[in-house]
Amino acid sequence: MKRTILAPIFGFKCPRCREGHMFVQPLSIKNAFNMQDRCEKCGLNYHPEPGFYFGAMFLSYIITAFSFVIAAFFLIYVMKIDVDMALALVVLFAALFFVYFYRLGRSVWLTMNVKYDPHAIEKNKQETSKD
């Protein structure tokens, strides 16, 4: 199945095979920050080195800040909402989507650093059958 580059990013899928899940339980608030150790489909190591996701923190910050600025401008200038109410709504938006932006930052960072391989699943099956 061929997918665009946006599908694994926003679906939190493995960037190499674009099928395995990056996070343990995608919809669980209790385990919202827990990532898989490896892709269950192609075997990609999601934690290649200590501090690997340090750059993801900056990406997450940029994505989040950009989203909040757009939301604030939309609320103030398009919806004509008071600045104080717009700020309150943006803070509520931030609280509701914090986990999503955290995951999105990690997903983008991993996708930027791992090349797509359409044959990764078959290669992983061959390597595991040899053992």
Image (spheres, rainbow, N blue to C red):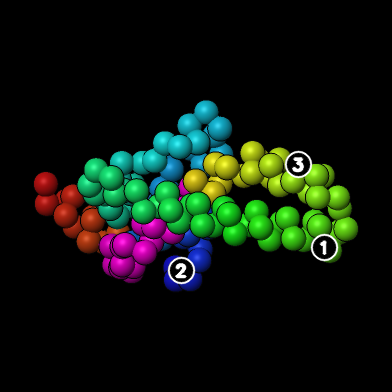
Where is 36 relative to 19, above or below? above
Query: Is disc 1 placed on a helix, strand or loop?
Result: helix
List the single residue furthest toward the left.
131
87 left or right, relative to 28: right
Report the magenta residues as a range: 103-120
Magenta segment main secondary structure: helix
Q: Residues within 10 Å of mark 2 (few under 14, many from 20)?
A: few
Q: Is residue 60 magenta?
A: no
Determine contact: label 1, label 3, CB under 8 Å. no
Q: Residue at x 81, y 50 (%)?
A: 83
Instruction: Please name the residue that numbered disc 3 is placed on.
Output: 88
Q: Residues within 10 Å of mark 1 (few under 14, many from 20)?
A: few
92 left or right, relative to 17: right
Residue type indicated by callout 2: Ile
Q: How many marks?
A: 3
Q: Residue at x 23, y 56 (%)?
A: 124
Residue type indicated by callout 3: Ala
Determine contact: label 2, label 1, CB under 8 Å. no
**Closer to the N terminus: mark 2 or mark 1?**
2
Residue type indicated by callout 1: Tyr
Instruction: Classify residue 38 by image quadrant.
Output: top left
Instruction: Please name the residue that numbered disc 1 is placed on.
Output: 77
Between 97 and 42, which is closer to the camera in this rendering? 97
Between 103 and 120, which is closer to the camera in this rendering? 103
State which mark lies toward you, 2 or 1. Answer: 1
**Residue 22: image x %, image y %?**
41, 48
108 left or right, relative to 126: right
List the single residue furthest toward the top.
30
Between 66 and 35, which is closer to the camera in this rendering? 66
